[in-house]
Amino acid sequence: AATCVIRFSVDVLGAPGKDSSAEPGLQTNMLGTTVATSSGALSASGFGTDVATISRATPSLATLATPSVQLGGQLSDSVIVSSRVNPQPGATIDFRLYGPDDVDCSRPPVFQSLDVPYPMGGGAVSSTPFIPTAPGTYRWRAFFSGDHNNDPVAGGCNAAGEQTTVTTPLPPQAEKPPAKPKKPRSEKAGPSVLSYRFFRCAKPEPPFTGRTRHAGRAKDGRAAIKASDSNGTCAGKTFEVKVTGRKIERVRFLIDGKVVTVDARAPFSLRVDTRGFRVGSHQLKAKVSFSR
């Protein structure tokens, strides 16, 4: 008797139209054609039946959660479902969030965003935002419900990209008080001092030894002191000292530390009669206050 080997293949659709009332996961009788060829010159052909099991496709999940947030901020999760076959309407995503004290996601979730519709066309969908009340590491899990042609899929605990770190914000730094505006320099509180030295001389009279001196304090303010002549500072003589300059408001004249007079308006001058002074050196000062 002759022997033969029969080889054949059958293409099966997820939703077959040829077999009546076929459902994914059920066994169906499908028509097939077999061709047998012997090793000799004889050949034969005929029809037979075979049994096939139609299984749902197994999609995959790509998830991404908020990586980090400060306490008081919002965190959320998102997912993309890929590798679906002939998607059907009605699929949903459940998002579950587990607290910092639940490292293996075995306790009840601290937050859930359930029945988020997943579109037939695919793409990313996100959970409702959640505001945490304690710092730590939170863990997300996403669950795809499946549909007529695709199996449900559950994301694992501690999956990549599914952890959110919640930190405590740093205490606010104390605001520095605004800098106090600088007070305009008060020239009255610290006047410029012009010094002038003269002599009460014994006869024969020595030459005059005074000289002009300058000082200034306020912006653009300047003053100078000068004696009237070089021969009027010895015994029995009178000489005049003048203060001239810009923005002068007041001049106080002192001789040997004692106030002699105060001039509040120009000309700022003082006549000195040397006959009333002892023989020797004397110090004349003019304290000049400038206007602002």
Image (cartoon, rainbow, N blue to C red):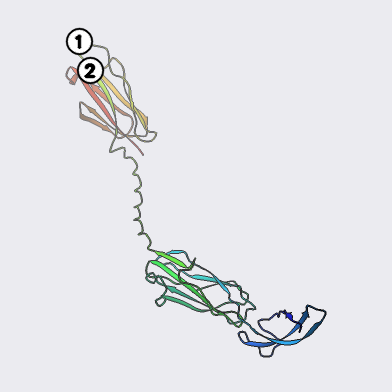
Is 228 rendered above or below residue 289? above
Quadrant housing residue 276: top left
Residue 111 in picture, x, y percent from top left: 43, 75
Q: Which residue is mark 1?
A: 203
Q: Nearer the viewer, mark 1 or mark 2?
A: 2
**Gap in angstroms between the C-alphas marked 1 and 2:** 12 Å
The residue sitting at 27% across, 20% down in the picture is: 239
Write down the quadrant of residue 60 in the picture. bottom right
Please tell me which residue lies in front, 282 or 128: 128
- State the residue in front, 237 or 143: 143
- Residue placed furthest toward the left: 278
Quarter of the image where one finds residue 137: bottom left
Specify the amino acid type for callout 1.
Answer: Lys
Which quarter of the figure is the C terminus placed in?
top left
Q: Is residue 224 left or right of residue 9?
A: left
Q: Is residue 216 left or right of residue 130?
A: left
- Residue 214 x, y percent position in the rendering: 34, 26
Residue located beneath label 2 in the image: 199
Question: Dividing the image into 4 quarters, which one contains the N terminus?
Answer: bottom right
Q: Residues within 10 Å of mark 2 (few under 14, many from 20)?
A: many
Using the image, tell me which numbered label, if any, was put on residue 117.
Answer: none
Q: In the figure, is residue 57 to the left or right of 6?
A: left
Give the number of marks. 2
Q: Is residue 119 above or below residue 246?
A: below
Of all residues, the one furthest to the front in this rendering is 1
Of residues 270 and 292, which is closer to you in this image? 292
Helix, strand or loop for disc 1: loop
User: Residue at the bottom extreme?
Assistant: 20
Q: Position of residue 146 (x, y in %)?
A: 56, 80
Cβ atoms under marks 1 and 2 closer than 8 Å: no
Q: Which amino acid type is marked by label 2?
A: Phe
